[in-house]
Amino acid sequence: MKTQVTLLILGLCLSSGVYVRGGCKEGQVFSNGGCEDTGRDPQHQKSKTSGWGLNICHEGYYRTGAECKDEDECDTLEPICGPDAKCTNTQGSYYCTCQPGYRSSKGLIFTAEDSHCRDINECVEGKHTCDPSQTCENTLGSFKCSCRDGYMIARGDLACEDINECDTDPGICGSASEGNCTNTQGSYTCACRPGHSNYGNGQGRCTKLTCDGYDAGGSDEQTEGGFGRLWAKMRQNCENLRSGDGDSSHTGHALLEDVLTGTDELLSSSQSMDDNSQVTGLLTMMEKAMLLIGPQLKQNRTKMESQHTEAELAVKRGKAPPTGPVLLTTENASFRTSWETAAGNGTYPGFTVAALVSYKSLNSTSASSFEALREEMQVERRKEQQEQKVEVRLQIISNVVTACVSNPDSHILDQPVSFTFKHPQERNVSERLNYTCVFWERDMWSQRGCESSSNSTHTVCTCNHLSSFAVLMALYDIKHTFELQLLTWMGLAVSLACLFVCILTFGLCRSIKGTRTTIHLHLSLCLFLADLIFLCGISRAQKAGCGLVAGLLHYFFLAAFSWMLLEGVQLYRMVVLVFHTTLRPAYMMAVGYGAPLAIVIISAIAYPQGYGTDQHCWLSLDHGFIWAFFGPVCIIIFLNAFSFIITLWKLAEKLTSLNPDLSNLQMIRGFTVTAVAQLCVLGGMWVFGCFMFQSVAMAYLFTILNSLQGALIFIMHCLMSKPVRDEYAKFLRSICTPGKSEYTQYTSNPSSNSNQPLKSNQSTGQSQL
């Protein structure tokens, strides 16, 4: 009965149009099943008295005259709850509720200050109603269902039904003789007939696969250089694909690892790649291996690196040929092409492969592999420079790379491909240095079909075919001008004339005989013969006797340095040990001529091809053979410099002593200074001689110093020596006035005899020195 009364009261209140708060009139509260009076004026709940005695409205109300009325927060231009929520006004406040498909972090009811509505991802939370044959795609506030691949929208309802690919595309697995198609729910499988394969791709088109190209006993490339084991593994893999045996996803990756490991063994073994057929075998094997391995890889991109090789493969599968660019990279090279070029215009097998292999240590091949290219470049250079003779040296400076694609017509491409190679050292292109893009063709390097563009750090090769590529650095010999040739002839003529006079002086003048004179005689003789051979035979490259000329130059220049070493030893003994000391002739001959002969013999036995090059009759730069000369020279220069420093130091001590022998000490000091100057000129000459064939300036400096050494020896050891000048004066007097000379000699005999002991002592002392 009480409940009925309460409902009756609520109905009367609602029908009277009075605002109800909690089901009661304003100023009342619902309590104990009914409305009770609060004892306060309802207007008092909407206002309050400020500290200044003013009556103001509560938050959520606004004043109209003497009353405070409720403010409708939901009535705004911009939705206060946001676009994904509904706003509900209450007395003095409001609340928000989210639209269907949204929710807030504060529950069902919240305010804009507390939270906001976020979309519910029905696909992730499993609140969608999509069929298993459909895929769920989330949308704002909802979701949508679409058919999966292999399904289509059914006619009668929203569900999807399976597509029978075998009926819609009868050739999806190839012709009936190539493979059979079996439909499955949402997909299909291809079973290849014997002799055909889809490389382990169950939905790939079956194509004919022949393994004859992987026969280990077939071509020369497959039997050269120890490649038989790798060819056998590839053939076994191919036979497994033809028969449908084996896990292809594992086999492809494992075969790639085996090929790179086997290549490392070949490149790191003592068996070199100097034989062109071995290089051809390696590059051919690698190209076929990549085309066999690529379709078997599960990943779209596979990158593998070993000690000496680095490979990257890209594979795209699909019903239609792929499109777009493709870029493959290794540490120092990159390969850029397009999927259209990689696929080609032939029958599409359901996949396209692009591969790049870089060989880190295949940076040298035999000299015969450059012959045709060198002749071609020399002809071009002669046309450009209008020179009668051009010499060029070729050197591989980049990693050799093998690039291959599925396109069977890769020897002639519709669109060019590009390679970018990084230089190991920064060197700018100049008149005598150029970079050339080359590829391996029939056991030799060729530049046919390739164009190059280079700066100091990189070379870009653009080619209309695929193969194995590299960058060659072409070094052209300097153009020997008439002025340089004239200077060479004149300088060497002056040097030979001075050395010839020195030989006559030291060999015929008996009054100056001694250990130092003997050293100077043989030093002059060695330099004379070396300069004479240099003048007559240095340019006999590619002619008979060039190796002999190089060997003689090696020997006589080493002998000259050996006699300079003996001069340093003699000066050291004169100062440190005793003033009047000599070296035994047998010891001097052993050091001066025997040691250089031993070095030349050992060098010739170790690397006979090092004597004579394609450009000059001198020591080759290959295999560091030039150090057979520069090594001993550096040791001699160091020893002489060390002995000269000690000699000068001892001289300084003796000059500051209490009783110095000034005459002898000053004479030895003069000897030492001339020996140091001689070492500087001859040693400095070979500093420039290292680069004389690479720079015009170096060639001029070498020629000048080479002509100065003969003149220097003549000036320092002949003209600056008082005993030698006296001999020259006596010789000239005997020629100009022979009668007077005899009379003077006859009349001065008593005086001479009286002074003979003193003169003999001085002469002996000079001779001993």
Image: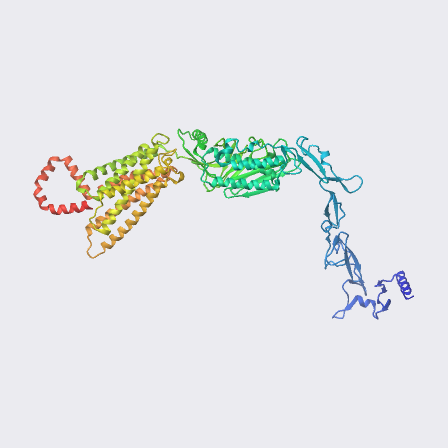
Q: Is residue 274 left or right of residue 299?
A: left
Q: Nearer the viewer, residue 244 or 129?
A: 244
| Quadrant (top left/top right/bottom left/bottom right) for the N terminus | bottom right
Q: Residue at x 80, y 66 (%)?
A: 46
- Can residue 296 be seen by looking at this rendering? yes
Q: In front here: 520 or 370? A: 370
Query: How many dots with numbers?
Result: 0
Q: Nearer the viewer, residue 367 or 643?
A: 367
Q: Position of residue 709 (x, y in %)?
A: 28, 40
Position of residue 688 measured from the top left corner of the image (x, y, whole percent): 35, 41
Q: Residue furthest right?
A: 1
Residue 359 appearing in the image: no
- For the residue pair 420 and 17, the one nearer the viewer reads as 420
Colour convention of the picture? rainbow
Please tell me whether residue 79 is drawn above or below residue 603 in the rendered image.
Answer: below
Q: Is residue 474 left or right of residue 217?
A: left
Percent position of residue 507, x then y: 20, 38
Residue 708 x/y as whole percent: 29, 39
For residue 702, which quarter of the picture?
A: top left
